[in-house]
Image: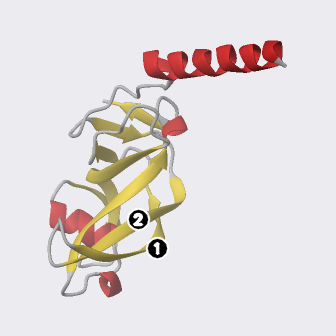
Amino acid sequence: MNRFFSVVAIAAAAVVFAVGCGGEQDLGLQSGDKLVVTERFERARFEASYGEGIRAITHTNGAFVEIPEGTVMEVFVTPRRGAATIEVIPVQAVIQQRDEEGAVREVTVTDADELRNHFVQARYLTHDFIYYSFSFPAEYLGTKLKKQ
């Protein structure tokens, strides 16, 4: 029994040591870093936050939208060590718009309000809307999301 307990104690100490000494992966991202979407996301969910202010969020809502390849995202919140997701907001996207004659043309959009209106449907932009963001799996970093 003592041997079994000793083996378990040593194994547990090794796990604690590994986690405490960098056992969790650091993504190497900071708030403000830019990431480029390398392939079109057909169904990416945005989360819209609502409330009285950034520190007083009362609820969230969201929907699935398409994100075009080449969209530039900005890291919204610095991911913690070992984070499973990366929270980002779009800062540049090439979108299709119709001109006065009805022809479709591609336009690069960098204006925050235009980007919000493109990605967030009007029904989500209520009086208590504060901001929106996307959360992507950390595994996307280096493949579907490349650091700029």
* Amino acid on which disc 2 is placed: Phe
* Secondary structure category for the residue under label 1: strand
Q: Quadrant of the N terminus?
A: top right
Amino acid, disc 1: Ala
Q: On the picture, is 67 further left or further right than 42?
A: left
Q: Quadrant of residue 15?
A: top right
Q: Which mark is residue 123?
A: none
Residue at label 1? 63
Q: Quadrant of residue 70?
A: top left
Viewer can see residue 98? no
Q: Nearer the viewer, residue 50 or 146?
A: 50
Spot occupied by residue 103 in the image (x, y as percentages of width and height): 34, 71
Q: Position of residue 107 (x, y in %)?
A: 26, 57
Q: Residues within 10 Å of mark 1 (few under 14, many from 20)?
A: some
Give the residue drawn at x 47%, y 64%: 45
Residue 32: give x, y in percent of width and height: 20, 39
Position of 111 with respect to 28 (left or right) is: left
Residue under the point 26% across and 33% down: 30
Q: Is residue 16 above or below residue 105?
A: above
Cα separation, mark 2 vs mark 1, equals: 6 Å
How packed is label 2: few (under 14 Cα within 10 Å), some, or many (20 or more)?
Answer: many
Residues at discs 2 and 1 in contact (Cβ within 8 Å): yes
**Quadrant (top left, top right, bottom left, bottom right) of the C terminus:** top left
Tag of residue 46:
2
Residue 85 position within the rendered picture, expressed as x and y whole percent measured from the top left: 46, 45
Q: Residue at x 68, y 17 (%)?
A: 11
